[in-house]
Image (spheres, rainbow, N blue to C red):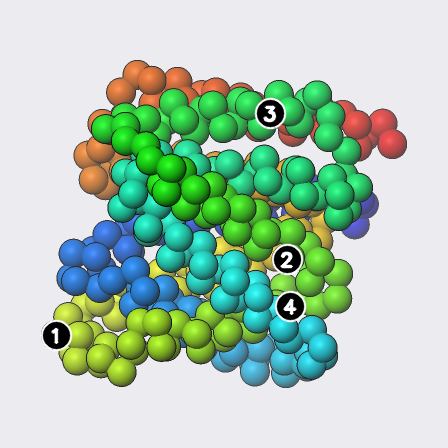
Amino acid sequence: MSSFNKKFLGEFYIIACAVLWGIISLFTLPLNGMGFSSAEITFIRSLFAAVFLGVFILVEDRGLFKISLRHLPFIAFMGIGCFMTVCMLYTLSIEENGSSVAAVLMYTSPVWTVVISRFLFKESVTWLKISVLIGVVGGCAMLSFGGELRLSFKGIAVGLATGLFLALYGICGKIAGQKYQPETVTFYVFLFSALAGFFVAMAWRLPVKIGENPISLAYFVGLAGLSTAAAYLLYSAGLKTVSAGKASMLSTLEIIVATIVGIVAFKVNVGIVGYLGIAVTILSLVLLELVDCKKTKEM
């Protein structure tokens, strides 16, 4: 397979991941309605995803379980310091800022990624990337600012931290992907997240709660199987051929998918500004892709 086709396939993986992340509300909102907290949802999500991936590895290739002990702290940081932290910070950000501002602040992650990648991977920061970043963040802002706007120093700090740790996950995934297959990385990420989440969520109380809401198992299976295990496998696979900065930008398609799900499934009204935000975000990413494809073909 040519380098162009590999890169295109990697971008397809990232976009498919963004779609699976975007439908997450179809699972989490019903679970919230049943009384499950963010910590409980994050724990069960991580546990089920680790089990799914573990079974998959057992069937396909048990060698994928092999990992160097010296790399475990790094993978543990991805699971606890990145994945679980993002889930918890995002919930706190919504409480402090409201869902609209929280979404915009989380999607500052491409900015963090481009800046950090400049120093770690020597990825170039071009005027095109800067323009696309402005377009993507601006489009997400237009899309999200449909509700009440409330800001505080604590809220802004928590929101920016959410974006930072989301960026760190992508950057760490890029590094881990140089040594291990996506299945190995994502399995251990969710395993460590589940181990830490057991205590945070006080998981020993969950069997009774699930027993009172047996339908919740179906939502947890969908959340863990589609929006977690499959999504993060695709993201890790995409990072093998796509730069961390571009992957972060492409993943902002999640907010567009999430908005469409909100409009169709939950009758959310985003207004004309919201639809303009969708258009600005998509056009910015299309511009990035067209220029990038042209450069790749010329090489």
- Of the numbered discs 1 and 2, the one sitting upstream in the chain is 2
What residue is shown with label 1?
Answer: 212
Q: Please, what is the three-letter code of the amino acid marked with disc 1?
A: Glu
Mark 1: give few (<14), some (14-19) or many (20+) Cα within 10 Å.
few
Q: Nearer the viewer, residue 270 or 295?
A: 270
What is the x, y in percent for residue 190? 49, 69
The nearer-to-camera label among 4 and 1 is 4
Q: Residue at x 33, y 35 (%)?
A: 152
Residue type at mark 2: give it. Gly
Q: Which residue is mark 3?
A: 132
Question: Picture coordinates of residue 9 (x, y %)?
Answer: 66, 46
**In this image, 53 relative to 113: left or right?**
left
Q: Position of residue 263 (x, y in %)?
A: 26, 33
Q: Which of the 4 image quarters holds residue 226?
A: bottom left
Q: Disc 1 vs disc 2: which is toward the camera?
A: 2
Q: Secondary structure at mark 4?
A: helix
Q: CA distance from mark 4 to mark 1?
A: 38 Å
In three-dimensional space, the C-alpha distance between marks 2 and 4, rounded to whole angstroms, equals 10 Å
**Disc 2 versus disc 3: distance between alpha carbons?**
23 Å
Q: Earlier in the sequence, mark 3 or mark 4?
A: 4
Residue 74: mark: 4
Residue 86, disc: none
User: CA separation, marks 1 and 2?
Assistant: 38 Å
Q: Position of residue 193 (x, y in %)?
A: 46, 70
Give the residue pinned by disc 2.
173
Tag 4 or tag 2, which sits nearer the N-term? 4
Q: Residue furthest right?
A: 299
